[in-house]
Image: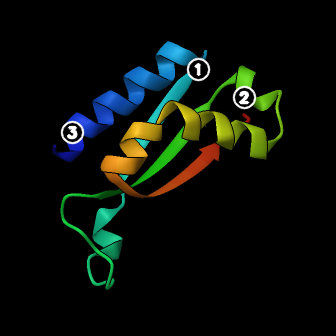
């Protein structure tokens, strides 16, 4: 799987499960290339999600929801994930 495929899967899965106004996914893999645990088949992504549904929850619960939605991808393709909730 490449980053473009992963990005599409992540977007589709999140949008299917929760109402989002916008979602941006950034590939941050390049920041971790020199790390000992770096694996070229696993990615480091940053999610920026704007969702009234998630904004009505605390950040821990919102993060748990995203982790549950992306459970398979996190196990197989994502080494690191940063999640930001855009409240504006």
Is residue 6 depicted above or below 78 in this figure?
above
Residue that mark 2 sits on: 54
Residue 87 vertical position relative to residue 19 in the rendered view, above or below: below
The residue indicated by pointer 3 is: 4
Crowd rating for badge 3 (residues with CA inside 10 Å; few <14, some 14–19, many 20+):
few
In percent of the image, x 58 and y 48: which residue is there? 83
Indicate the quadrant where residue 87 lies.
top right
Q: Nearer the viewer, residue 52 or 10?
A: 10
Disc assigned to residue 55: none
Q: Position of residue 55 (x, y in %)?
A: 77, 30
Q: Residues within 10 Å of mark 1 (few under 14, many from 20)?
A: some
Q: Secondary structure at mark 2?
A: helix
Tell me which numbered mark, 2 or 3, is placed earlier along the sequence: 3
Disc 2 + disc 3, Cβ < 8 Å: no
What residue does disc 1 label?
20
> In what quadrant of the picture does the C terminus appear?
top right
């Amino acid at each position: 799987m490449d980053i473009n495929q992963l990005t599409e899967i992540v977007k589709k899965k999140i949008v299917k499960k929760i109402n989002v106004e916008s979602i941006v996914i950034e590939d941050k893999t390049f920041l971790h290339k020199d790390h000992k645990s770096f694996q070229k088949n696993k990615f480091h992504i940053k999610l920026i999600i704007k969702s009234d549904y998630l904004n009505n929850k605390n950040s821990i619960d919102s993060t748990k929801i995203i982790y549950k939605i992306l459970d398979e991808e996190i196990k197989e393709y994502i080494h690191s994930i940063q999640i930001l909730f855009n409240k504006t």
